[in-house]
């Protein structure tokens, strides 16, 4: 019996015992007196069980046919294996014309074992992993977008490098967003201080791996991945945040302690934060770092051939025309007529762009001098921006729009001023009429 039927049974029992009238019981139960009399007869004949609904346990008169149920389940089993109820319902409705609801299909698939509800699934077990034995063997890296300056400055991102063996904070760099150039800067500081680690452990952000399953172009390697490959440093992408838990826990510590330390010192911008980062990093390691299980340091020194100035650039290739010209980012470049430039005609040369926007061209190990001829473009192309870089991209767009508005206002003001001066000069030069 349901709770409603149990409450109804107690009221009917009071009516039978004479402690309550049928009219009062009808008011309490929201029924008619005739219905109360019928319930009293059922209670006297069968007891409290006589008040239970006779339809309970019987199939509904509006249920769908068994033929439709078998047809839908057979289609899901044969053609849509692994489909969720929502997607399977869309296919059954659009392709096969079956009329049923998503929840009905979900109920059928659950009964038939084709779908396991989330509540019934076994929880995923995250087993702990032992630390690596040597320092520099595995370094966990990640960016943390946070209100580091609270209300004193703009929101920014901290790039954090944590050694897996010791838990030490190896590198800390504040920047506007996670980008290839920001990771270039942070990694360069790490390499110059410690040397080359064996591997970097990161998430699956677009800086570290190409996430497009069917990329239309390129070699499937990101700019950061290309630079690390040249330095013989492997990149390992974690499948879950818990897998790189050391750097994730470091984020929580930094968001608590580092924010308060910068508040005490009145730090409110990225430059000042980076100036304080070295001092705080030493204090962090003194408090939280631990000794590795092995005394061996897995860091390798930089090689003489490792030119970090060239490695940490944005590198692409472009084809040189017969006229010794090439295009890069809507800018036409004219190569100086040298022996190396002549040999590069019709070939693809290397293009290296630095963070400050300077561009250089290379062919056969030689730099090709060039002159830029910017094209006039009225419409800016649509760009793809990663989620982690969206804040910085919007700030840049707003700044560009403000500059365009100010330039337009200045141009309008100059035009009006020139028109007024021209009108005033013309008016002064107009001869007066002879009134004699």
Image (cartoon, helix red, strand yellow):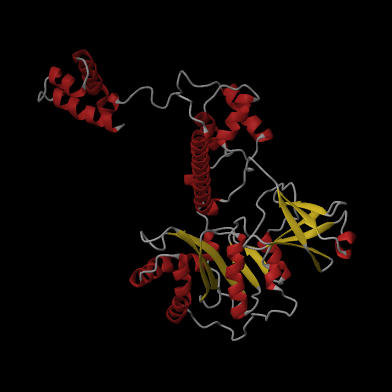
Image quarter hosting the N terminus: top left
Q: Which residue is drawn at 55% across and 73% down?
A: 164
- Give 312 or 102, whichever is nearer the viewer: 312
Q: Is residue 104 above or below residue 390?
A: above
Image quarter hosting the C terminus: top left
Residue farthest along the top direction in this orientation: 34
Task: Judge from the rendering whether residue 57 lies leftward or rightward of residue 19; answer left or right.
Answer: right
Task: Judge from the rendering whether residue 45 lies leftward or rightward of residue 89; answer left or right.
Answer: left
Q: Which residue is drawn at 47% across and 76% down?
A: 281
| Residue 86, x across and y down, in percent | 55, 34
| Residue 346, x across and y down, in percent | 88, 53
| Residue 343, x across and y down, in percent | 90, 61
Task: Judge from the rendering whether residue 241 lies leftward or rightward of residue 1; answer left or right.
Answer: right
Residue farthest along the front direction in this orientation: 436
| Residue 125, x across and y down, in percent | 52, 59
Q: Is residue 134 visible?
A: no
- Give 65 or 231, whichever is nearer the viewer: 231
Q: Which residue is drawn at 43% across and 68% down?
A: 254
Task: Judge from the rendering whether residue 9 lies leftward or rightward of residue 380; answer left or right.
Answer: left
Q: Residue at x 70, y 46 (%)?
A: 375
Residue farthest along the left direction in this orientation: 19
| Number of dots carrying numbers | 0
Q: In this view, does 23 lie above or below 56?
A: above
Q: Is residue 321 visible?
A: yes
- Give 367 or 432, whichever is nearer the viewer: 432
Q: In this view, does 5 lie above or below 346?
A: above
- Give 131 or 105, whichever is nearer the viewer: 131
């Amino acid at each position: 019996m349901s709770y409603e039927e149990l409450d109804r049974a107690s009221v009917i029992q009071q009516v039978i015992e004479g402690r309550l009238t049928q009219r009062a019981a009808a008011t309490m139960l929201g029924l008619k007196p005739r219905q109360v009399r019928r319930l009293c007869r059922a209670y006297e004949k069968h007891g409290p069980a006589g008040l239970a609904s006779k339809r309970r346990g019987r199939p509904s008169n509006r249920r769908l046919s068994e033929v439709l149920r078998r047809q839908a389940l057979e289609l899901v089993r044969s053609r849509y294996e692994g489909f969720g109820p929502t997607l399977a319902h869309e296919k059954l409705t659009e392709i096969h014309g079956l009329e049923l609801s998503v929840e009905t299909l979900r109920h059928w698939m659950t009964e038939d074992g084709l779908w396991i509800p989330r509540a019934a699934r076994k929880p995923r077990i995250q087993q702990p992993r032992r630390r690596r034995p040597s320092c520099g063997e595995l370094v966990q890296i990640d960016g943390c977008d946070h209100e580091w300056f609270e209300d004193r400055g703009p929101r920014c991102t901290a790039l954090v490098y944590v050694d897996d063996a010791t838990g030490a904070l190896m590198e800390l760099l504040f920047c506007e967003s996670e980008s290839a150039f920001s990771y270039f800067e942070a990694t360069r500081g790490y390499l110059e201080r410690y040397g080359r680690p064996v591997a970097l452990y990161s998430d699956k952000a677009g800086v570290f791996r190409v996430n497009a399953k069917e990329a239309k172009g390129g070699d499937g390697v990101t700019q950061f991945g290309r630079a690390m490959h040249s330095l013989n440093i492997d990149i390992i992408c974690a499948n879950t945040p818990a897998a790189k838990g050391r750097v994730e826990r470091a984020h929580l510590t930094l968001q608590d302690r580092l924010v308060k330390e910068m508040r005490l010192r009145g730090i409110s911008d990225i430059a000042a934060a980076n100036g304080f980062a070295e001092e705080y990093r030493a204090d962090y390691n003194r408090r939280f770092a631990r000794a590795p299980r092995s005394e061996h340091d897995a860091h390798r020194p930089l090689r003489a051939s490792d030119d970090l100035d060239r490695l940490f650039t944005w590198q692409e290739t472009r084809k040189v025309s017969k006229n010794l010209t090439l295009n890069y980012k809507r800018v036409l470049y004219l190569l100086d007529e040298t022996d190396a430039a002549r040999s590069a005609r019709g070939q693809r040369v290397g293009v290296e762009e630095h963070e400050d926007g300077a561009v250089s061209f290379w062919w056969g190990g030689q730099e090709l001098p060039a002159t830029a001829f910017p094209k006039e473009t009225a419409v800016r192309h649509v760009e793809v921006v990663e989620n982690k870089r969206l804040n910085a991209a919007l700030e840049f767009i707003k700044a560009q729009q403000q500059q365009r508005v100010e330039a337009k206002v200045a141009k309008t003001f100059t035009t009006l001023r020139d028109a007024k001066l021209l009108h005033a000069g013309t008016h002064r030069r107009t001869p007066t009429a002879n009134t004699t």
